[in-house]
Amino acid sequence: MGKFLFSVVTFAFFLNHSIAADFSKPHFHLSKFGTEGHAINERNEVLGLHEYRVGQGQEFVQAQRPIVWDAQTSAKISIPKTLEEYTAMAGKDISPDGTIVGRAARFKASQAFLSTKEQGTIGLGTLPGKDFSSANAIAKDRIVGSAAGGMAPEVACVWNRADNKLGWEIAPLPIKNAGPATALAISSDGKFIGGQDEDKPVVWIEANGKWIRHTISSTSGKVSGINNNGEFVGYLNTTKQVGQPASRLGMYGSLKEHSLIALAWIPERGYGESTANAINDAGVVVGNSWTLSGKDSDGWIWSKKNPELKRFRINKNGDAVISAKFEPPIEAQEGEEEGAEVSTVLIDITDAGVILGQAEQPEKKVGDYEVQNMFVYKY
């Protein structure tokens, strides 16, 4: 359920926890060169990337590898082995039982993968006539993603667990024309899929064993999260106008109510682009908004039941600062000291209200990049 270039506060007192955390205070997974969160499951297992260096001194390459972190105990659960004959892997989602899906890559090739403790890492294959594939989300006995090959555009697809429960069978999802299209999210009951088709946000609904495609808006954008109630989130692109520099706004929609609501469209308060990243079955939405300069980000929380947008930032003491006063901090000029809060983004949320996010550490850098680490917090 969600990918960013952010950075984070390294707090020594988050290290070496030996007791279970309650997440009433942001709980960080720390690494010298940073960590990046992608998804969290209901067991509070976090799928992310571990940043590390290859080389010494100024002669180094910033590299990444998947990591699974048990946020409850602060233990590293596993680092999936790379798919055979592939050189890199990127995890995209983690299921309630700890199954990981994502994309393995090598020179001029990529393949969707699945990784479990029992099976190890296996390739999921691709559609006939295609050379590439990527798995983006998993729920129950379904995985969604995309396939591509040659000069043909990317197409959305779904993998269903085979009747013998030992393998997976891939099938295309219906799309408007020839693509490009991709499936990015799936509800936990496996009945709703969200994604993008020809740059438009779309939802696929299962009905009588078939998938029915619904275009959400004629405006370009994407659906990045969807729940069991048919509520979905993502973003819409907007046409730039004088005095309105934002080109992307977060969105919430409901299939049952046939509604679409713009979220965090607040350029008059100093923000530019915004996006809604995830929604849980209680309808709580998490997302982030960028300042007009693009240098800073605020996380935010919203729900239709409680529609007042809540700003979420981490301060330099490692505390969560949640406020209805949705205004970005004044960015420090050259030579000035940074403010008391740091750039924050909210990536995912569980049904229990545990949020996965990231926050930056302006004081620490690797080359030209600020260090980043992921955290969890109970809202």
Image: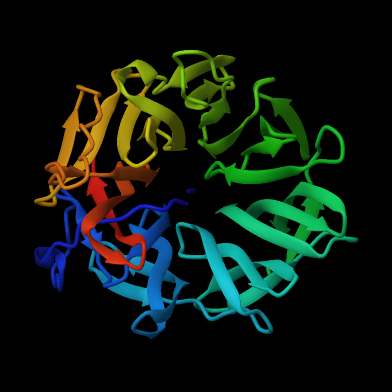
Residue occupying the point 65% across, 21% down? 217
**Residue 45 placement (x, y as % from top left):** 36, 61
Residue 152 makes an appearance in the image: yes
Residue occupying the point 75% across, 35% down? 198
Between 317 and 362, the one nearer to me in the picture:
362
Picture layout, residue 192 above or below residue 23 = above
Residue occupying the point 75% across, 50% down? 157
Between 94 and 339, the one nearer to me in the picture:
339
**Residue 96 placement (x, y as % from top left):** 45, 57
**Residue most extreme to the bottom:** 56
In the figure, is residue 372 to the left or right of 164? left
Which quadrant would the C terminus be assigned to in this image? top left
Residue 230 makes an appearance in the image: no
In the figure, is residue 23 to the left or right of 75? left
Between 134 and 229, the one nearer to me in the picture:
134
Picture layout, residue 41 above or below residue 250 = below
Residue occupying the point 38% across, 60% down? 36
**Residue 226 placement (x, y as % from top left):** 53, 36
Picture layout, residue 356 above or below residue 84 = above
**Residue 320 placement (x, y as % from top left):** 17, 42
